Amino acid sequence: MYRSNGNYEAFAKPVKPEGVDNKSAYIVGSGLAGLAAATFLIRDGQMKGDKIHVLEELGLPGGSMDGIWNEQKGYIIRGGREMEPHFETLWDLFRSIPSLENPDVSVLDEFYWLNKKDPSFSHGRVIQDQGKELPTEGDLTLTPKAVKELIDLVMTPEKDLDGKKINEVFTEDFLNSNFWLYWSTMFAFEPWASAMEMRRYLMRFCHHIDSLSNLSSLRFTKYNQYESLIQPMIKFLEDKGVQFTYNTHVTNIKVDLSNGSKVATEIEMTTDGKENNVELTENDLVFVTNGSITESTTYGDKTHPAPTEHELGDSWKLWENLAAQDKAFGNPDVFCKNIPEANWTISGTITLTDDEVVPYIENISKKDPHSGSIVTSGPVSIKDSNWLYGYSISRQKHFKRQKDNELVVWVYGLFSDKPGNFVNKKITECTGDELCEEWLYHIGVPTDKIKDIAENHASTIPAHMPYITSYFMPRKVGDRPLVVPEGSKNLSFIGNFAETERDTVFTTEYSVRTAMEAVYTLLDVDRGVPEVFASAFDTRTLLRAIYYLDGKKKIEDIKLPFKERIVEKQVMEKIKGTYIEELLKDAHLL
């Protein structure tokens, strides 16, 4: 497996891998990573679909790509995965998946057209004081000390950040800034999260620094991601003959570690409660989704909170059993145990059944939520919320079956250890109605109307997800297994708990990238995996980031000591009329 850039290899079909007709594949987990692996096996590996077996513990595919109608509870979304133009492998994947609405075009085509017609732009990124705009909206409010801390983190080698937390490398100067407020609520970072992952994000997404306050860099699907992305993939794969086996619990994969190699020899599993083990040879490729952020999710309803008690779950137990065989298979305990109580665990789906709340939504987002245009363009974060509450309203209808009078709102709270501002409870203790009440309070609904609206004009479903931010647990090099561990002949790890360089977890891109790397490595596919977008290596991007990080100051406005000012004048004279001057002007620094 090797990496490439540019479009020369992006459009090329690789030569059929040698011996692929004698191989088969077993994919554990039918989330985005698993479905992507199956697609790449067929498209680039040219494996017959009926040789591919997807094993899923639930009764339906999709993993953490959310959006479902539940007959008893109603609409449920546990979250939404933000996407952007530089998800190179994601768009490489969806260029090959036909749209369900128009099979003559791809999912990428319809997604591209939609976001050209209706681009993302937030008119109310942060609010406070019950629905009022943040007075410093758009200003990153970074002090020189905070900027230095950012630069110091980026300059620190990843290996020197083993086990470090964000609040161990940043002071209050940074953590009190609007930059951190925008960044943490956009990407779901907590102060205790991995400094190593924070560094990756800064390097991966430095091209977003100029749009943190308006989210114009993001792209969104027409409906929820299950209907817009997962369902077209399932149809594509089923039409190719891929075998899906649901209600299947994979408990272990036995690996032969003799002779310095690693060969998966048996899958231990049950299907519908019956033992259904599979013996393997080196020609049987295994792709394991190790760990899951939505494993063990529980649900409440209008009058009951989501239960917080849960078992460890299949994906974690399987990873534990694999890790017990070889340290190269990672350390799952780092990610699924000792998670801080303060972390995000609760989200909620609010279904509004009439337009009682529409004026308050429009006051913040400056959009009619029934217009069909994306409403909030990502999260609206509430700065003075004890829960650090936030909400997002996507294009409506968010579900194909949604009624014209209904609006679906997703809410989440990053802090779970404090009582709310209106509801005097921790978010984990709240019923659906109480989650709705807290949201209504923060968007400016008069307090005497809140209870009636929550109870009689809305239905809210809480979801408890004990591992939702476990991607970000402070980690060391080696805690995540390599996509294909050294010496492995037929075993790989895919998804956001596998390790690939430079890219960032909690993204759809990471899921697809690991799947592509696994397929290309095990089948020796002769086509490059598109490299991670190199924004941190682009001088133009870096200069533009400096302009915004330093409060949109031009070079002459930056306060420098006397000696440095003299040197600066001399340098400015030297670059006058050169390409460097052009770059600085393009970045607004001159």
Image (spheres, grey):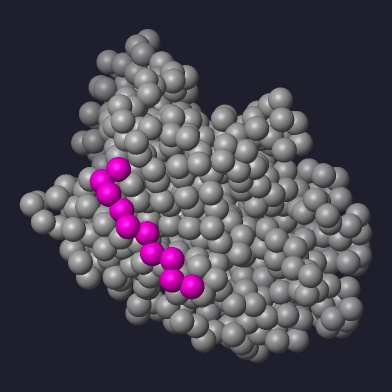
Work out whether 241 lies above or below 382: above
Between 205 and 571, the residue placed more toward the observer is 205
> Would residue 378 be counted in the magenta stretch?
no
Q: Quadrant of the C terminus?
A: top left
Between 389 and 352, the residue placed more toward the observer is 352
Tell me residue 23's x, y (percent). 35, 39
Tell me residue 437's x, y (percent). 75, 78
Q: Is residue 351 left or right of residue 249?
A: right
Camera sees residue 186? no
Which residue is the extreme one toward the left? 259
Tell me where residue 307 sits by quadrant: bottom right
Tell me residue 153's x, y (percent). 28, 52
Residue displayed at 48% across by 73% down: 274
Q: Is residue 38 left or right of residue 155?
A: right
Work out whether 19 lies above or below 137: above
Residue extent of the magenta highlight: 274-283
> Would residue 276 be counted in the magenta stretch?
yes
